[in-house]
Image (spheres, rainbow, N blue to C red):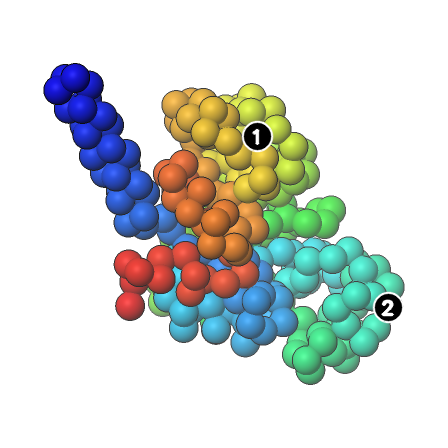
Amino acid sequence: MGSSISKGLVGIVLTLVVMNCSDHYIPEVIGHRGARGHIAENTLPSIQKAMALGVDGIEIDIFRCATGELVVFHDDTLDLLTDAEGYIEQFSLDSLRKVNVLGGYQIPTLKEVMDLIDGHVRLNIELKGNQTALLTNELLQYYFEREESGWSPEKVFISSFDWKELELFYSVNPTVPIAILTEDDPLDAIPVASRLKAFAINPDYETLTAENAQKIQEAGFALYPWTVNEPAAIQQMKTLRVRGIITDYPERINVLEKP
């Protein structure tokens, strides 16, 4: 009888210790498209807001517009987020300058975003459109080679659902870290992650379980799930010891741990 009670108490204590460790685990905080929950996504003010909230990094999306510049925008069309309509890749940069993102903001270029952040936090560049890999590499090299720049390869990482675009980027730049984006079973991303020497797999958080998270981590890859906004989901990701959390609300992630 006494032995059973002792074992029961030990189990309770161990459970409390694990819960306490999970509660105080501090993952990296990655602002999703800046601070999307506060200010229009992928705009300079949204990125400034995320930095003010103390993020470790910022995730943005890029397309190549018709005149060749890399612009920061998520959707392939302007229809939902702006006062214009049409495919973003068919607009010149001058035309995009006249487009208003909801709330009266402007679509920035990748160069403008990099100038704003200047390496103060990490930047996750998601390649959304065609022909973005090579142009992104060219722009990154421009910043890496400038002595006055705050950018270096470890302050950037490249992700995409288009694994062929990631392969193209890796073929010209094996130095900048790569993360494999996936919305299906994240275990399916392990082969391409191994081939591209990726450091991370970025899954839809709803596809992540204790089992597949452990397998991915044991294979040597960090996890950066998206888009984790609700307290229960945040706590679940902390319990899984993910490296970082991509969120619309950066202030929610480590509210007890960070001032």
* Residue displayed at 30% across by 41% down: 19
* Residue displayed at 43% across by 61% down: 252
- The residue nearer to you, when weighing 216 against 108, is 216
* Residue displayed at 57% across by 30% down: 186
- Residue 67 horizontal side relative to residue 160, left or right: right
* Residue displayed at 62% across by 66% down: 41
Amino acid type, label 2? Glu
- In the rendered image, residue 158, in percent from the top left (x then y), is placed at 53, 45
Instruction: Confirm whether residue 168 shows in the render.
Output: no
Lower position in the chain sequence, tag 1 or tag 2: 2
Where's the C terminus, which quadrant?
bottom left
Q: Secondary structure at mark 1?
A: helix
**Residue carrying label 2:** 85
- 99 over 179 or under it: above or below: below
- 11 over 52 or under it: above or below: above
Q: Residue furthest left?
A: 2
- The residue nearer to you, when weighing 228 against 157, is 228
Amino acid type, label 1? Pro
**Residue carrying label 1:** 186
